[in-house]
Amino acid sequence: MVELDASGRALSIEEKPKQPRSNIAETGLYFYDNDVLDIAAGIAPSARGELEITDVNRVYLERGELFVRLMGRGIAWLDIRTHSSLVEASHFVQILEQRQGLRIACPEEIALRQGYISLEAFEKLAQKNAKSSYGEYLLSVYRSFGREAGGS
């Protein structure tokens, strides 16, 4: 759990506290610089005998280098530590994709929408996968982008 001050800066971070100081969970989506390798190497196992990511994050907090970004509405965090929770998460993603007609975390589509690849490069990727349902989705995105760009 992460405690933030009024400006959103992290004040404290605790692993599975009995009485949390806040209701902000540390979800498990982290981005680190190369210092993380040395930091992790210096972390001692917890009472559970495990290396805790919270201990790594605490080092960044002590350095004043821990930055927390809150996830807003529409973001779902799914814990997939067990086989049954993995199946549950899979069903959740499947239902969202079917109902919305959009793929979740489609790298090619993200690259296109962010301008990392051209429409032509995207089309080549879509054509390589054209015989699968994934490829069919990529082709539908390609056609949609072509219309948005004023093409046929």
Image: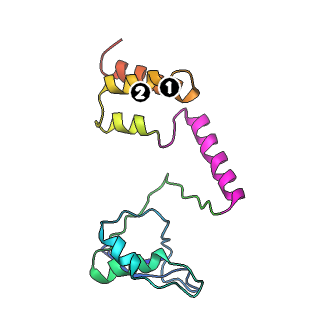
Measured as percent of width and height from the top left, residue 84 is found at 72, 57
Left or right: 74 as drawn, with respect to 110: right
Badge 1 element = loop
Left or right: 85 as drawn, with respect to 141: right
Query: Which quarter of the image is occupied by the C terminus?
Result: top left
Residue extent of the magenta highlight: 82-105
- Whole-angstrom CA distance, mark 1 to mark 2, is 7 Å
Instruction: Verify whether residue 71 appears in magenta.
Output: no
Q: Is residue 128 above or below residue 116?
A: above
What numbered label is drawn on residue 129?
1
Give the residue drawn at x 46%, y 77%.
54
Q: Is residue 75 above or below residue 129?
A: below
Give the residue drawn at x 48%, y 55%.
73
Give the residue drawn at x 30%, y 74%.
7
Q: Which residue is mark 2?
A: 125
Residue 5 appears anywhere in the view: no
Q: Is residue 8 above or below residue 142?
A: below
* The quarter of the displayed image where residue 70 is located: bottom left
Identified by mark 2, the residue type is Leu
Identified by mark 1, the residue type is Asn
Measured as percent of width and height from the top left, residue 61 is found at 34, 79
Instruction: Verify whether residue 85 appears in magenta.
Output: yes
Asked whether disc 1 touches disc 2, contact meaning CB atoms under 8 Å apart, the reply is yes
Badge 2 element = helix
* The quarter of the displayed image where residue 11 is located: bottom left
Give the residue drawn at x 61%, y 35%.
98
